[in-house]
Image: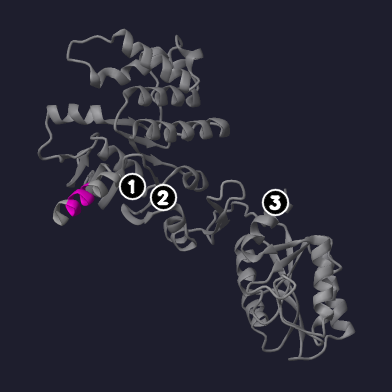
Amino acid sequence: MTIERTAKSELQDSEMKPVVQRVLDVDGLSTRLDGKLIVDSVSLSVDRGEVVGVVGANGSGKTTLMRTLAGLIDADSGRVSIDGDWFDSASENRSSRRMRARKVAYMPQSAESHPFSAFESVLMGRYPHLGRFQLEGSADRDLAWRAMERTSTTEFVNRKLDTLSGGERQRVVLARVLVQEADLLLMDEPTASLDLRHQILTMDLVREEVGRRNAGAVVILHDLSLSARYCDRLVIMNEGKKIADGTPWEVLTPGNLRVAFGVEGLVEPDPVTGKPHVLLLGSEDSSGEELVGAGRKVHLICGAGSGRELMHQLKVAGYEVSAGVLGTGDSDREAAERLGLEYVSAPPFATISDEQHEAHMELVRDADHVVLCAMAVGMNNVRNVVAAAGATSLFVIEPPGVSGESGDLEVGDYTDGLASGLRRGLIEQFGEVPESTLLFELARAQG
């Protein structure tokens, strides 16, 4: 009796747990073009209901991977499973290609131009579901019309595809992908030719289609923040290899951006969506492109290591950076010297003199923005905090750590409350920001 109850309980538990269905499995896929290895031993998977984004620099193998998955290019080695059916170049025949065509809808990077009407082009998405000599029926035409309504392309219904703009053709091709009702959507830069509004609408449609039919999608995107907003997982390609695979937060790291794109970047929560937002700061070989901080001066009031990371980040972002009064042996002074920053020199642990304070004030007045770091303050350097009051654009960095009795986050104050009082007055006037969001705040302040 006990055994029966246990078995029944286990059966009920198994019925309650949702079974995740895999729509795509890629095992060790490699592809060569003209004898050159373009995709190198890539393995990945997509579950039903999941949108997976593929990102990477130009030439990293993204499009070749997508065309191989779609069956347009023969793989050199490896296997692809779509909805449990395995395909490889050695065993694929006409029948298996037709089966793949029913299961996979492919949207190319560039929408083709031909003299068919937009409606005829969309209706072509129904061909894999028709018999060899079967013509489209009213149900197929209804599906095509609804797909054009969803993509806002009904106004082009009788227009020839070669008379449409690139973005308009892209939306017609998206309608053709939707009307195919495939289990797997493979989309190569579906937003590339679109304006901002239609980029959002396109990705909304992809998510809606995947959720509505419990399908899966693999989407190549160049906009990393857009990828993070719409994709459940991201895969980064670099030189034909998969170098990262996971959630957007796991994949979009400064280290991965550096390896895959050769850029420095910050990844912070988008203030609206909470998804990762990527701010590219530039690179050493940015080919003359203007960096976000180009032509702007930022002055750091720091000490004892509180400004080292920001010095580097600001320099990489293209800002001209200076620092306040720094004593000999201070780690921020050492960092400023390594980076070639202008600062005001002082002996170790010496009280800031009138001359040093005036030199500091000149740097404050000359800067577009001043940043007061979360540094410890004693009577010897309290005039650094006084200097911050001379700024017209000031960012007070919120200190890390545990809140004090007042509820405010504490910094080291060895001035009997003088420094804390000065700091609170500056916060009341200018507010307070976490160090992690400073680069975003500076970019916003520049308009």
Q: Amino acid at mark 2?
A: Gly
The picture places residue 447, in percent across and down from the top left corner, at: 72, 48
> Disc 3 vs disc 2: Cβ atoms closer than 8 Å?
no
Badge 3 is on which residue?
444
**How many residues crowd around disc 1 within 10 Å: few (fewer than 14), some, or many (20 or more)?**
many
Who's the residue at 44% across and 18% down the image? Answer: 148
Q: Residue 348 appears at what percent x and percent y?
A: 73, 91
Q: What segment is highlighted magenta in the picture?
A: 5-11
Q: Is residue 19 above or below residue 124?
A: below
Q: Is residue 185 above or below residue 54?
A: above
Looking at the image, is mark 3 or mark 1 earlier in the sequence? 1
Residue located beneath label 2 in the image: 56
Judged by depth in the image, the label closer to the viewer, 3 or 1, is 3
Residue, far left:
91
Q: Amino acid at mark 3?
A: Arg
Whether residue 140 sits left or right of residue 278 in the image: it is left
Residue at image point 73% right, 64% down: 298
